[in-house]
Image (cartoon, rainbow, N blue to C red):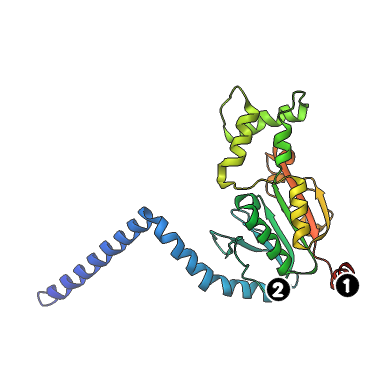
Amino acid sequence: MTENSPTRSRLFNILARLGITLAALGLFCVLRFDIVAPKVNLFKAQILSPSRIDAYMKANSVRKLQIGAGPSQKPGWLNTDIEPVREQVYLDATERFPLPDSSMHYVYSEHVIEHISYEQGQGMLRESYRVLAPGGKVRVATPNLKQFIGLFQEAKTAEMQNYTLEKLRWHEWPATPDPECYILNQELREWGHRFVYTPKMLRASLEAAGFQNIRELAAGETDDPVFRSVEMRAFEDVRDVNRFETLVFEAVRPSAPAVAALNK
């Protein structure tokens, strides 16, 4: 018993130091998340994501990319985010997508493109075009600036009045002398929004990226079964608010013959 005491003491000291080191490391990670987060994302981007992308490609004949998935984990989709969780893949919408040309059949984003600049948004749409196979489809849902501007008209419809009340209730925003002004400012500045589109601007952006058959749709509306029920907000308790304020477009990457006809 006595002979083992020094050994046990050394083991205890080693374990104590290890525990203190791990606790200090954990505290550092919490206090300096600004330093740790980029390293974690780099690990996910360079180590975890390539294998997950490869596995997804091999397992799915119809490939569907969701950009900026957040909490929306869709079965059968390659769910990506700049801060991936669970089995998601790292993807920065402002950079080249980590995917081969013409490798996807569907690309979808819900309330993502407004979080990056106009120029970055154009890049995101060009990348969506690049990774789509000919005949592949893109669907983009984003706040509609035209709807928010329309709230300032003097004669307001019942839909506008209901929207204003429900929007304030949803976000628990205060009552102000000019709720339309408050809503517009919050929509433009909160949640990291950087550029909010009108239908005219988003349509032009899709055209510039090369897309055709561009259609404006209501939130939750589609004639493609793959896109049916993909929007979280279109089927939640805020669906009426979402339907009023959300702009949705679907478009198609043309086939090679269609591109050749355009270039004649």
Looking at the rendering, which quadrant does residue 246 occupy?
top right
Q: Residue furthest top?
A: 177
With 20 as the anchor, is 215 left or right in this view? right
In this orientation, does residue 169 appear? Answer: no
Q: Which residue is mark 2?
A: 101
How many marks can you see? Answer: 2
**Which three-letter amino acid code belongs to the residue tagged 2?**
Asp
Q: Which residue is mark 1?
A: 257
Q: Which mark is residue 186?
A: none
Residue 193 at x, y = what percent? 59, 46
Query: 108 or 234, which lies in front?
Result: 108
**Which label sits in the foreground, 1 or 2?**
1
**Which three-letter amino acid code belongs to the residue tagged 1?**
Pro
Quadrant that contains the N terminus: bottom left
Looking at the rendering, which quadrant does residue 187 occupy?
top right
In this orientation, does residue 31 appear? Answer: yes
With 182 as the anchor, is 245 left or right in this view? right
Residue 124 at x, y = what percent? 66, 60
- In the rendered image, the vertical position of residue 139 relative to residue 159, given as above or below: below
- In the rendered image, the vertical position of residue 206 relative to residue 257, given as above or below: above
Q: Earlier in the sequence, mark 1 or mark 2?
A: 2
Quadrant that contains the C terminus: bottom right
Residue 137 at x, y = what percent? 78, 62
Q: Are marks 1 and 2 in contact (CB under 8 Å)?
A: no
SS for tag 2? loop
- How far apart marks 1 and 2 lie (CA) works out to 18 Å
